[in-house]
Each structure stands twice: as C-alpha cells, then as structure tokens.
Amino acid sequence: MLKETYLYLIFNIIAVLLGFLTLPIFTHYLSPEEFGIIAIFYLFGNFLAAFLSFGLMNATYRFFYERNEDLEKFKVINFTNIFFIIFFFVIGYLIISNFFDIISYYIFDNKVDSQILKLSFLAGCLLRLYLYFLNFFIYQGNAKLYSASEITYKILTAIISIFFLIFLIHDFYALIYSSIITSILMLVTVFFLNRKLIKFKVSLKAFKNSIIFSYPSSINEVQGQFQNSFDKVYLNKFSGLYDLGLLEIANKFGNLTKIFINSFANAWIPRFMNENKNESNFNEKLYGQYIEVVVLINLISVFFTVYSEEVIILLTNEDFYFVKYYVPLILFYVYIGNIFNLIFKLQIFKNKKMYLQIPVSFITFITNITLNILLIPIYGTWGLIAALIISSVVSNLFMFFRLKDFFNNKQMNNKFFLQIILYIIIIFIVYYIIYLDIDMVLKILLKTLLLLGYFFVIVMFGIINLKRVLQLVNQSIKILIKK
C-alpha cells in the first residue's frame, strides 16, 4: 500500500503546488463575486449529473471486483451502464433546457444567467463521464495512470484558464470554457485507456441489477449534492455573491486536505477489497492500517490549519484576506467528515449493503438543511460552516454505532478519539494567534513551535509511533530514489 500511497501523493502534491501558483493569477483577474458565479457553475452541473446518473458508477465498480469470474459479462455491464448514463443525460437536458430561465430567476435571483446554467449542465455531465472511466485506475490499483491523468487534467485546466484570462476573455468565462475543453480532452483519453473493459452490447438485465445495487448510493449522493448546493444557494440569497466567492476560495484550501485524504484512500481501497474478499469482519492488520491512515490525515490537516493564514496572505490580495478566518474550520470539517466515511463506505460496499447509506444520508441531510435554514439568515457564512460541522458530527455518531464491531479495540479507540480532541485544541490556539496583532514573522515562529509541540504530544501519548514514522520516511525515500 505504501508505494501506491506515495505515487498518489507525489502527483497530488504537484496538483497542490499548481493550485498555489495559479491562485494569485485568478485572484488578480477575478473578483470575489466572480468566484461566487464559478461556485454556482460547478454546483449546478454537478448536482444534475449526479442525479441523472442514478449511482450507476458505483454498481460498475462493485461488479468490477467480480470480473475474474466472467470478464465478458462485466464488459457488457460496463457498457450498459455507460449507455444509460448518457441516455439519462440527454433526456434530462431536453426536459430541463425549457426551465433554465425560470431556474435563474427563482433560485439564483438572476445573478447567474441561463447561458451559464446550460454550460454548467454540459460541464457536469462531461466531468461525470471522465470520473467514471478515471476511477477504474483506482480499482485496478494503477496509481500511475490515475495520478498521471489527474495531474494532466489539472495542468491543462490551469494552462487554458490562464491563457484565456490573459489573452482572450479576461473574466470568469475563462474558467468555464477551460473546464469544458479539458473534460472533453481527458474523457477521450481515459475512455481509450479503458477500452478493453467495454463490449458494445446493452443488457436490460444488467441494467436492472445495477439499479438494484446502486439506488441506495444514488439517494446518498443526490442528497449530498443537494445539501452541498442548497447551502450555497441559500447563502447567495441572504449574503450575495461576494460571501459565496470568499467561501469558494476557503473551499479551495479545504480541497488541499481532500487531495491527501484521497491519496491514502485510493491506495487503501484496492488493498482492503482484495484482502477481505472472504472475511465478514476487518482483520487486525487492516484495523491498524486504518488508524495509521487517520493519524496521517490528522497531521496533514493540522499542518494546513496552522499555516493557512500565511498562505492566504501570500497567494491572494486584500479582497480575499478575510478567508483566513474560515479556512481552519473548513479544514476541520473536511477532516472530520471523511475519517468515518472512509471505513463505513468500504464496509458496506464490500458486503453489498449499500442501503445502510440511506439513514446516514438522511440524518446528514435533515440536520444540515435545518441548521442552514436557521443559521445562515443570522450568521451568514459562519452559520453555513457551523451547519456543516454539526451535521457531520451527528452522522459520524450514527456511523460509529453501526461500526461498533470494528471499533472494538479500546486502546486503538483511545488513540482515535484523542487525536480528534487534540486537533480541536489546536484550532482554538490557531484562532487566538490569528487574532493577535503582532508581526507575521513572530506568528510563524509561534505556529512552528505549536506544530512541534503537537507532534511531541501525539508521540508522547502513543498516538503515533516515532519508530514507525522513521520507518515510513525511510521507505518513502527508497521509493523516491527508485523513481
């Protein structure tokens, strides 16, 4: 697993650096309001694409692990699901295209015109199809192709966006057109690389089996997309595009943590699925690996939290400096929202109990929507962030009780929850330092001492083993040298 993790990390670190390098350019040419429009562009298309694909992607990936039993059968299932996803996209567009003006007026207060919504729908469908084929590399354990495809996608998007911004368009349409062009190019590429997994034959029986398997995950995903869309639409209504644009920038920093979480998850998923084919419960070795993954995610999240203020000031301008107050809590939400999901989804995915996602989705959905309605009109963006964290904690409690057979090691449980508590303490200290009116160099020194102190504490409490850390560093150096 370690080798695959470092492959994902190397390419994703490049993606992070690319994001850092392009952010000053984007914030120079675009205003917070234009970032708000971009946020709506992404959420509208992604929501419709998720809704119209009916979770068929998840069914394909699950049947992929049974391909050794009958590869030809899987090829038919694969093409059948692709066919129906595209079919639903086309039908969906024919229906929704008559209502774009109405959606623009009633949902987005005419702040986003119907042309942007049409482009958003196209971009969402293209991205969905690209991800469909891209994720085959994860499930095949092919870290090289996955990472190479992703970094190529990000580089192409950045190059095209910057070219359009500087030489042709000079506004947010540069990012919209670059997203569509890149998705088309990369969709063709990943389709070609996975062409051997396709047989051009449609099977209604395969479609029926896929729908039966995938409908719980479909409900879960659509609820998640609706929840993610609702809070931004609601924030736009009460606070406007400016606050929505600042939130979009804050989410970009939150995505840094997601990149590293995905790096560990992408390496761990194939190992988990392959080593637990005939086991009803997780074995002790994989349990230990899960705790290691969670602690590593914790360390990365804490690092970004500690230095988020300096990064924002370095990479943006004064119009965006207020984002520094949002980022620590956004990073914590990303962290707390993924550590339980990682193991819960894998367990129900392996055991074909996708229906267990429904109560989790329902709890998160109801809690988040209710809190958004109550808090956003009063507290604006702070209310939105609070709703995200609280709803995530509530759903995590449900998942924890569902995973009680997994969390049965008291010593490991103590480590698991202690590192969460320590992270919360770090957040309070970081906010105190952010509000201090002192020289930036002194702030950096204080935060560095804080980070070193945090590492010392987690080693002292045995949350992470120093010998194991040195072993991981040594193995990673060897992998990098071989590269």
Image (cartoon, grey):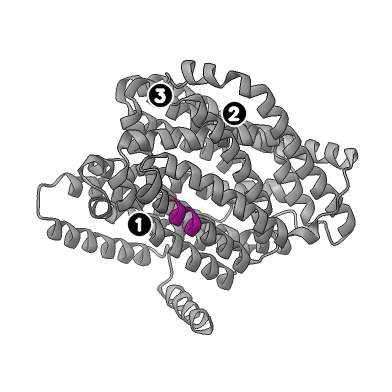
Separation of marks 1 and 2 at Cα, in angstroms: 36 Å
Q: What residue is rendered at 48% in x and 59% in y?
A: 155
Neighbourhood count class around disc 2 (C-alpha, 10 Å): few under 14, some 14–19, many 20 upward: some
Task: Answer yes or no: is residue 282 visible.
Answer: no
413 relative to 228, above or below: below
Residue range (magenta): 154-160
Residue linked to disc 2: 362
Q: Is residue 259 left or right of residue 124?
A: left
Q: Dot 1 corresponds to which residue?
A: 20
Q: Earlier in the sequence, mark 1 or mark 2?
A: 1
- For mark 1, give the secondary structure: helix
Amino acid bearing label 3: Lys
Tell which of 468 and 319 is nearer to you: 319
Q: Between residues 34 and 166, which one lies in front from this camera angle?
A: 166
What residue is disc 3 on? 111
Relative depth, front residue between 9 and 410: 9
Q: Is residue 288 left or right of residue 435?
A: right
